[in-house]
């Protein structure tokens, strides 16, 4: 994935899916398909990781790089959005009792996702030829994933007009993207072997780990793919823990920490902690981030500077 064709490969399925409006009765099937496909992609990432020589000696480096990237990107996002909430306060949201059951299910899901990577790692070690199938399989799985996301967005009844008229959702998206890219440049400045474009690409996942993991793997190799995957996966854990805490005084920050998952994975947490009045903001923000994340990642991995 090192050419402009990558942008076509990713965005074409997205817009094709968005052009097809299925009855809402099909949404549960799309959701199930996405859930299973995410697991498949994570297994493929694990298989790719198994092909890295001296992996054991580099685990510490991968972890430290992912933690640094996470702190810089999410820190910049939170600071920018907390400033925005103070400078442009929203009406105080009603307090809704936190639903611990949903949070526990979400944490369980994140543990399952980590397990998929470990399963792929084990498969790659047990069946070395499987690594050779990764590139084609991963690309096709990614295209199918993006197509299903487009279907899901369109079939949910979301239109571009509904998104764009939510002023706060658009403002939140702009701040998250801008602050993340600034953090990506800082990450590149701190890590000598990372180019400016690579730093920007790594910062453009916005919590969409299944996409960032495989795009970064194909662009920069499995080690950097693992850094991107871990960075965006940790963002989910952070969102689950801190969305209810941030929602009281910083609703935009609460929605923003969820990144791309604010449209689906963390939406129940956002709704339960902020009430129905915050849902339009989450949907608008999540929709825009889901559209712009693949564009930015592919653009920055295509052009090197």
Image (spheres, helix red, strand yellow):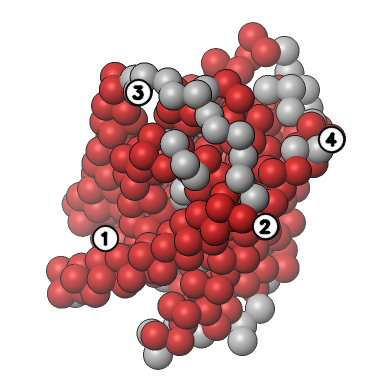
The C terminus - image quarter: bottom right
Q: Residue at x 68, y 22 (%)?
A: 156
- Give me the C-alpha separation between circle 4 and circle 1: 45 Å
Image coordinates of residue 5 in percent, x first then y, are 72, 63
Disc 1 secondary structure class: helix
**Separation of residues labelled 2 and 4 (CA atoms):** 17 Å
Frontmost of labels 4 and 3 is 3
> Mark on residue 174?
2
State which mark lies toward you, 2 or 1: 2
Q: Does the rendering let one see residue 296? A: yes
> What percent of the width, then of the height, locates residue 37?
47, 35
Residue 75 to residue 121: above or below: below
Q: Secondary structure at mark 4?
A: helix
Label 4 sits on residue: 161
Residue 206: x, y in percent?
51, 54
Where does label 3 land, which residue?
98
Q: Where is mark 1, residue-wise?
A: 50
- The quarter of the displayed image where residue 124 is located: bottom left
Circle 2 or circle 3, nearest the eye: 3
Q: How many numbered callouts?
A: 4
In the rendered view, would you say 99 is above or below 50?
A: above
User: How far apart in space, not on screen, are marks 2 and 3 (Cα)?
Assistant: 29 Å
The residue shown at (67%, 13%) is 24
Answer whether labels 2 and 4 touch (C-beta < 8 Å): no
The picture places residue 238, in percent across and down from the top left corner, at: 34, 47
Q: Earlier in the sequence, mark 2 or mark 3?
A: 3
The answer to whether 145 appears left or right of 7 in the picture is left
């Amino acid at each position: 994935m090192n050419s402009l064709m990558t942008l076509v490969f990713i965005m074409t399925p997205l817009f094709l899916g968005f052009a097809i409006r299925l009855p809402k009765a099909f949404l549960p099937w799309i959701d199930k398909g996405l859930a299973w496909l995410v697991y498949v992609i994570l297994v493929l990432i694990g298989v790719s990781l198994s092909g890295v020589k001296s992996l054991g000696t580099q685990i510490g480096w991968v972890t430290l790089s992912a933690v640094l990237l996470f702190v810089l990107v999410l820190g910049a996002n939170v600071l920018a959005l907390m400033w925005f909430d103070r400078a442009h306060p929203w009406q105080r949201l009603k307090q809704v009792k936190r639903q611990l059951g949903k949070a526990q299910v979400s944490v369980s899901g994140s543990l399952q996702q980590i397990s998929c990577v470990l399963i792929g790692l084990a498969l790659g070690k047990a069946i070395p030829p499987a690594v050779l199938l990764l590139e084609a399989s991963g690309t096709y799985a990614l295209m199918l994933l993006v197509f299903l996301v487009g279907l899901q967005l369109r079939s949910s009844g979301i239109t571009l007009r509904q998104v764009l008229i939510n002023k706060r959702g658009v403002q939140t998206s702009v701040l998250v993207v801008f602050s993340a890219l600034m953090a990506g440049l800082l990450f590149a400045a701190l890590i000598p072997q990372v180019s400016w474009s690579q730093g920007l690409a790594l910062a453009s996942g916005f919590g969409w780990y299944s996409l960032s993991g495989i795009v970064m793997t194909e662009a920069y190799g499995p080690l950097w793919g693992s850094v991107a995957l871990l960075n965006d996966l940790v963002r989910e854990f952070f969102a689950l823990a801190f969305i209810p805490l941030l929602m009281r005084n910083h609703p935009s920050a609460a929605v923003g920490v969820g990144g791309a998952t604010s449209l689906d994975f963390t939406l129940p947490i956002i709704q339960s902690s902020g009430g129905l009045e915050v849902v339009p903001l989450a949907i608008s923000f999540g929709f825009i981030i889901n559209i712009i994340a693949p564009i930015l990642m592919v653009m920055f991995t295509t052009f090197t500077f």
